[in-house]
């Protein structure tokens, strides 16, 4: 027999997942309900209302996709894009490339507007591409954790409106840690996941959809189930190419009609509901300020250790930082020692950054002063052990000074 689960305690300071807030874990252990129990549908409606506030939107269609963040990305793109339609994808990191890959699998014709990793895509290049391609959709990541850069979204809504495109934003890594003002942005679909700044476990994905995007998705509705009349049925090739991720069906399920689709992942819904309650209790401004303070204190400490931060610091996300691995220091050994000796996980990197940078997150429940100071103290000890020249104590002092300057 294998033993009962009893994992070691870890402080998860990578780019996600991070430690879930204890209240979220408690919410997940309450009893299950049948999916059409009035109490369950009440909880579903409450969750919709809570996430409208978290996404700063009036969008009626604000609900959850069962699956990790990627499930909501895929649901969005497969429901928006018919084969042969044009999409402009912004990319300066791994998650921009994921948008391209998913859009290609939808059969869409992708125009990639790229910036080098560590930078963001300039607005002028985006507008030029959108004017040229006249896409159905413009798709972008907000905070790309692979590079730690935050793409400015403010101007994209106007660009899309001028060229009649729908705007999709992947805010998985930023919702709850940076402002994601969906209506002010003029974004049509924005999606997230729980395991980053929302302080929950991976497994369910908040989504919000504008009426304009919903109307487009409903126009592609499948006739089965007798919802659309045969006359309304879209041409076969334009139908949404997925059942589980058919947002028209999922919206019908979350609507007053409660048309059966999947079985709602009740325990994950409880978790998502508690994550949103925590954010609104704290207040969005205070929440973002907490993430900013933790991210800046971490950055100040790392610099004081003599380390170099990766990428354009003017566009860095508040809640994750890339650190160039110093020459002569074994990056993976440092991560192992942090984990084995201190119980602290920090992140590695992918693609062109593999072996070049570590990534440290200060997200959700872990965007805390004690987590920042403990991580810096441990990293200093491990680096000193590898002969990296640094001023002992400088990192923690700098982070404490940053916090002291805020109060
Ligand atoms: C973490 C992350 C994802 C992937 O989320 P999963 O929950 O692993 O599916 C997608 N986009 C961004 C920007 C992320 O940071």
Image: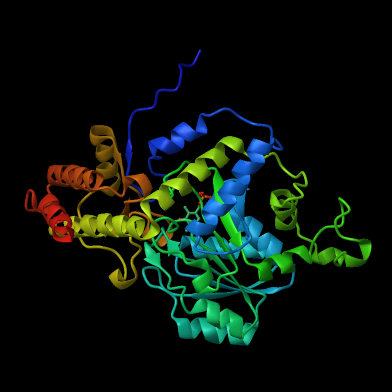
Residue occupying the point 39% across, 44% down: 18
Can residue 349 be seen here? The reply is: yes
Question: Which colour assignment does the render follow?
Answer: rainbow
Give above or below for 401 relative to 152.
above
Which residue of the protein is positioned furthest toward the right in this rendering? 230
Give how far across and how far down residue 67 sits, in percent: 59, 45
Left or right of 60 on screen, residue 233: right
The percent position of residue 221, horizontal first and vertical second, equals 80, 60
Residue 145: give x, y in percent of width and height.
41, 58
How many numbered badges does the structure rendering display? 0
Q: Nearer the viewer, residue 100 or 254?
A: 254
Q: Which quadrant does the C terminus fall into?
A: bottom left
| Residue at the (43%, 52%) spot, across then down | 280
Residue that appears at 27% across and 33% down: 340
The one nearer the camera, 369 or 4, is 369
Q: Is residue 269 left or right of residue 14?
A: right
From the viewer's perspective, is residue 2 above or below residue 222?
above
Q: Is residue 16 left or right of residue 64?
A: left
Q: Position of residue 25 (x, y in %)?
A: 45, 34
| Residue visible at 15% across and 47% down in the picture | 380
């Amino acid at each position: 027999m294998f033993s009962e689960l009893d994992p070691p305690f870890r402080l998860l300071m990578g780019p996600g997942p991070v430690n879930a807030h204890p209240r979220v874990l408690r919410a997940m252990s309450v009893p299950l309900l049948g999916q059409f129990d009035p109490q369950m549908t009440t909880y579903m409606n409450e969750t919709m209302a809570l996430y409208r506030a978290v996404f700063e939107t009036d969008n009626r269609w604000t609900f959850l996709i069962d699956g990790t963040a990627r499930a909501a990305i895929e649901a969005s793109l497969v429901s928006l894009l018919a084969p042969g339609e044009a999409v402009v994808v912004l990319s300066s990191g791994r998650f921009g490339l994921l948008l391209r890959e998913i859009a290609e699998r939808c059969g869409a014709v992708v125009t990639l507007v790229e910036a080098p990793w560590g930078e963001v895509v300039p607005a002028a290049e985006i507008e030029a591409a959108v004017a040229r391609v006249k896409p159905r959709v413009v798709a972008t990541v907000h905070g790309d954790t692979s590079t730690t850069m935050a793409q400015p979204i403010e101007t994209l809504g106007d660009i899309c409106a001028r060229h009649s495109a729908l705007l999709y934003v992947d805010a998985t890594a930023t919702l709850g840690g940076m402002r994601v003002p969906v209506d002010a942005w003029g974004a049509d679909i924005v999606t997230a996941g729980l395991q980053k700044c929302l302080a929950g476990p991976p497994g369910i994905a908040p989504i919000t959809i504008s009426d304009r995007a919903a109307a487009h998705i409903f126009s592609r509705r499948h006739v089965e189930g007798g919802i659309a009349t045969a006359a309304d049925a879209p041409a076969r090739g334009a139908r949404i190419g997925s059942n589980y991720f058919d947002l028209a069906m999922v919206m019908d399920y979350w609507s007053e009609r409660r048309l059966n689709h999947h079985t709602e992942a009740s325990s994950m819904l409880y978790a998502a509901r508690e994550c949103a309650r925590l954010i609104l209790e704290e207040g969005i401004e205070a929440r973002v300020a907490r993430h900013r303070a933790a991210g800046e204190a971490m950055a100040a400490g790392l610099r004081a250790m003599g380390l170099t931060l990766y990428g354009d610091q003017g566009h860095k996300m508040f809640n994750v930082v890339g650190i160039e691995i110093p020459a002569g220091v074994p990056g993976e050994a440092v991560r192992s020692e942090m984990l084995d000796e201190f119980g602290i996980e920090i992140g590695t990197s992918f693609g062109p950054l593999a072996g070049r940078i570590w990534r440290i997150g200060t997200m959700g429940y872990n965007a805390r002063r004690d987590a920042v100071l403990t991580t810096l103290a441990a990293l200093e000890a491990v680096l000193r052990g590898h002969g990296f020249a640094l001023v002992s104590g400088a990192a923690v002092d700098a982070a404490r000074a940053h916090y002291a300057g805020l109060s």
